[in-house]
Amino acid sequence: MFVAGTNHVKFENNTIIGADLPIQDNYVGILVHGPRSADCTGVVSDILIKNNRISGFYVNPANRNAAGITLYCADNVTIENNEISNNCSCIHSKSSYVPSSVNPAVIIRNNVLRDCLLGISSQSWSNWHVYQNVLYNHSTAIRLDNYQYFVGGTQPRNYRIVNNTIYN
C-alpha cells in the first residue's frame, strides 16, 4: 500500500502479507512518502495506520528497507494497535521535515512488533513519542541513526521512548 503527496489518509483493519520476491530496496507493506526535496518541504501529513497485521516483507541479504511500514518526509503520523512481524524492519523511517510543525511528529503506540531484525529504525527524524508497545525477538529493538539523510542538523532529537516492553 502506498501513499505519496496526499494528506489525511487512514490505513485501518488491513492484513498485508509480503511474498518471497527478488526485491532488494523499499519492499514495504505500507509506504508513506512525501516529496523528495532537499528539506522535505510540502510533507504528507495526518496519516493514521491503525489495527493492521503486516508481515512477510523480508529480503536476502537482509536490509532495513524491507519493512512493514516505511515513512519518508511525513508529519503528524500515528501508528497504533498494529501487529507487525517477520520483516527485516517492523517500522523504518527516513527523512523528516525540519523543523516539524507538529510535536510529536510521529506517535507509535500500543503495537506488537515481533520477529524482525529491527523493531523501530529511525534515520534523521525528530519529535517522536514511542510508548506502550511490545517489542520482542529483534536483533535491535530500537535504533536511532544520527546522520544526514536528505535533511541534516542534530537529529535525531526530541524522542520520548517510555513504558514499552522490550525482550528477546
Image (spheres, rainbow, N blue to C red):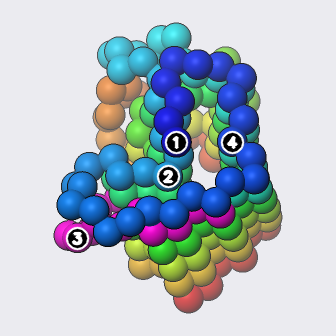
Q: Which residue is mark 2?
A: 29
Question: How many dots with numbers?
Answer: 4
| Helix, strand or loop status at disc 4 | strand
Mark 3 against mark 1, which lies toward the viewer?
Answer: 1
Q: Which residue is mark 1?
A: 1
Q: Tell me which residue sits at (72%, 35%) in the image.
A: 10
Q: Residue furthest top?
A: 42
| Helix, strand or loop status at disc 3 | loop
The quadrant of the rendering that contains the C terminus is: bottom right
Q: Nearer the viewer, residue 117 or 97?
A: 117
Label 1: how many Cα within 10 Å (few below 14, some 14–19, many 20+): few
Q: Which residue is mark 4?
A: 11
Q: Is residue 6 left or right of residue 102?
A: left
Q: Is residue 167 visible?
A: yes
Dot 2 and dot 4 residues touching (CB under 8 Å): no
What's the distance in space between the residues labelled 3 and 1, CA to CA? 22 Å
Amino acid type, residue under disc 1 in the picture: Met
Is 52 magenta? The answer is no
Amino acid type, residue under disc 2 in the picture: Gly
Q: Which residue is mark 3?
A: 60
Dot 4 and dot 1 residues touching (CB under 8 Å): yes
- Of pointers 2 and 4, the one earlier in the residue sequence: 4
Dot 2 and dot 3 residues touching (CB under 8 Å): no
Q: Quadrant of residue 67?
A: bottom left
Return the x and y of residue 159 as percentages of the image width and height. Answer: 63, 46
Amino acid type, residue under disc 3 in the picture: Asn
Q: Is residue 34 left or right of residue 36?
A: right
What's the distance in space between the residues labelled 2 and 1, CA to CA? 6 Å
What's the distance in space between the residues labelled 4 and 3, CA to CA? 28 Å
- Of pointers 2 and 3, the one earlier in the residue sequence: 2
